Image (cartoon, rainbow, N blue to C red):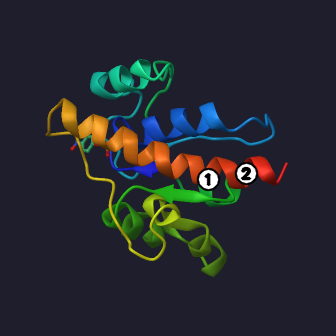
């Protein structure tokens, strides 16, 4: 799960997907394309909306997306088109590129919709992001769980 800062959207996506995937063989992680918040905990508004739904994301620490992530992960979900461009720029070949997709395309195939960056908004933005990610992670987890 990849966003810009790895403190608002992708930590939520990581926490939500973890809560829905049963297999311990599936490794789920998140990262940011920017390095501004490396080592930081998720934003307190993300922690709060997750905890309302019984999900604890307080142990996460922001990190930057690195090229090696293309080797370590089969699927790379980005939150918006800017994240998409930044990750694709790091891809070494077509195989790397094929792993990257906009997360909301799982719910609205081919529409290329963004999960809006809630950083400068209020609480509502975080609830909205939570609901979008919850829906997307439902689809993703069903695919993963049915492959086990
Ligand atoms: P995120 O949100 O990409 O969902 O983690 C942001 C967090 C921080 C910043 C931008 C977006 N920032 O500019 O510091």
Residue 120 spot, x, y in % from top left: 14, 40
Q: Nearer the viewer, residue 107 or 96?
A: 107
Rendered view: 85 above or below 6? below
Mark 2 lies on a secondary structure that is helix
Q: Which mark is residue 121?
A: none
List the residue tagged with mark 1.
140
List the residue tagged with mark 2.
144
Q: Nearer the viewer, residue 74 or 105?
A: 105
Residue 132 spot, x, y in % from top left: 39, 48
Outermost residue, right direction?
A: 148
Quadrant in the picture for residue 6 = top left
Task: Assign ligand 1 to one image quadrant.
Answer: top left
Mark 1, Cα crowd under 10 Å, few <14 / some 14-19 / many 20+, is: some
Q: How many numbered callouts?
A: 2
Q: CA distance from mark 1 to mark 2?
A: 6 Å
Mark 1 lies on a secondary structure that is helix
Q: Is residue 39 visible?
A: yes
Residue in view at x 56 percent, y 58 percent: 76
Residue in view at x 59 percent, y 54 percent: 139
Residue in view at x 34 percent, y 20 percent: 48
Mark 2, Cα crowd under 10 Å, few <14 / some 14-19 / many 20+, is: some
Q: Is residue 65 visible?
A: no
Residue in view at x 37 percent, y 60 percent: 83
Left or right, 102 with respect to 4, comes to right
Q: Mark 2 and mark 1 in contact (Cβ < 8 Å)? A: yes
Residue 23 spot, x, y in % from top left: 79, 37
Rendered view: 20 above or below 54? below
Left or right, 134 with respect to 9, comes to right
Residue 46 spot, x, y in % from top left: 34, 29
Left or right, 140 with respect to 103, comes to right
């Amino acid at each position: 799960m990849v966003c810009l800062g790895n403190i608002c959207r992708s930590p939520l996506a990581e926490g939500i997907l973890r809560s829905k995937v049963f297999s311990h063989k599936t490794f789920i992680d998140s990262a940011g394309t920017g390095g501004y918040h490396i080592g930081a905990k998720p934003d307190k508004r993300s922690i709060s909306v997750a905890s309302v739904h019984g999900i604890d994301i307080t142990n996460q620490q922001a990190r930057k997306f690195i090229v090696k992530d293309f080797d370590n992960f089969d699927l790379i979900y980005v939150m918006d088109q800017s994240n998409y461009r930044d990750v694709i720029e790091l891809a070494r070949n077509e195989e790397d590129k094929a792993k990257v997709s906009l997360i909301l395309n799982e719910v609205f195939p081919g529409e290329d919709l963004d999960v809006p960056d809630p950083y400068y908004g209020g609480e509502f933005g975080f609830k909205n992001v939570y609901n979008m990610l919850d829906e997307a992670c439902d689809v993703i987890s069903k695919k993963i769980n049915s492959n086990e």
